[in-house]
Amino acid sequence: MIRAAVDADLLVLQEIERAAGEAFREIGMPEIADDEPLPVDALAAYAAAGRAWVAVDPDDRPVAYLIADVVDGNLHIEQVSVHPRAARRGIGRDLIEHAAAYARDHALPALTLTTFTDVPWNAPYYERCGFRVMPDPEPALRALIRAESDHGLDRWPRVAMHRPLPR
């Protein structure tokens, strides 16, 4: 089940992010594994804006989450993370589809994201979800990419991707 994130979920979202990040350590990207999740106040802002969703287990405990912004008039997936114990069950894809429904309901024409090109659960996964590489991102997305580079993410190849949504 997917529902809106609430304040009581926010510390769990940080736990999910840390657990999901450990997979990067296994592929030689320990800096990504060690990167701290967004602070609770930032996650709370996504929840307050109505752009934070969680997938929950039968006990209503979050096992995955997605947060999104509106960037260049599109719904931009800022983060999607699935706890390893819930991985490989389609939960990430379900969250992406939930975000797509939100975008359609709010007349946003596409989903966008930025991601690592050579990480199997990043760009190759998003391509299977219908995303395509954007050769020339729009201005606000380019600024976001520059901010990610300033944070050191450009040590590994990255791309911006988009998925147009049917009206």
Image (tube, grey):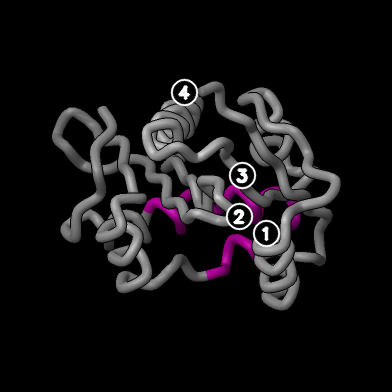
Disc 1: which residue: 141
- In the image, the segment drawn in magenta is 16-35
Mark number, residue 72: 2
Name the spot of residue 151 as percent of width and height, x first: 67, 75
> Quadrant of the rendered structure where residue 86 is?
top left
Q: Earlier in the sequence, mark 4 or mark 2?
A: 2
> Quadrant of the rendered structure where residue 62 is?
top left
Which amino acid does the dot numbered 2 rest on?
A: Asp
Which amino acid does the dot numbered 3 rest on?
A: Thr
Disc 3: which residue: 112
Is label 2 in a helix, a strand or a loop?
A: loop
> Quadrant of the rendered structure where residue 144 is?
bottom right
The answer to which of 24 and 162 lies nearer the viewer is 162
Q: What crowding class fits label 1: few (fewer than 14 Cα within 10 Å), some (14-19), or many (20 or more)?
A: some
> Of circles 4 and 1, which is in front?
1
Residue 87 visible (yes or no): no
Q: Are marks 1 and 2 in contact (CB under 8 Å)?
A: yes
Q: Earlier in the sequence, mark 4 or mark 1?
A: 4
Overall secondary structure of the magenta section:
helix
Which amino acid does the dot numbered 1 rest on?
A: Leu
Q: Earlier in the sequence, mark 2 or mark 3?
A: 2
Name the spot of residue 106 as percent of width and height, x first: 39, 39
Measured Cα–Cα span from mark 4 to mark 1: 27 Å
Measured Cα–Cα span from mark 2 to mark 3: 9 Å
Q: Are marks 4 and 2 in contact (CB under 8 Å)?
A: no
Q: Are marks 2 and 3 in contact (CB under 8 Å)?
A: yes
Measured Cα–Cα span from mark 3 to mark 4: 19 Å
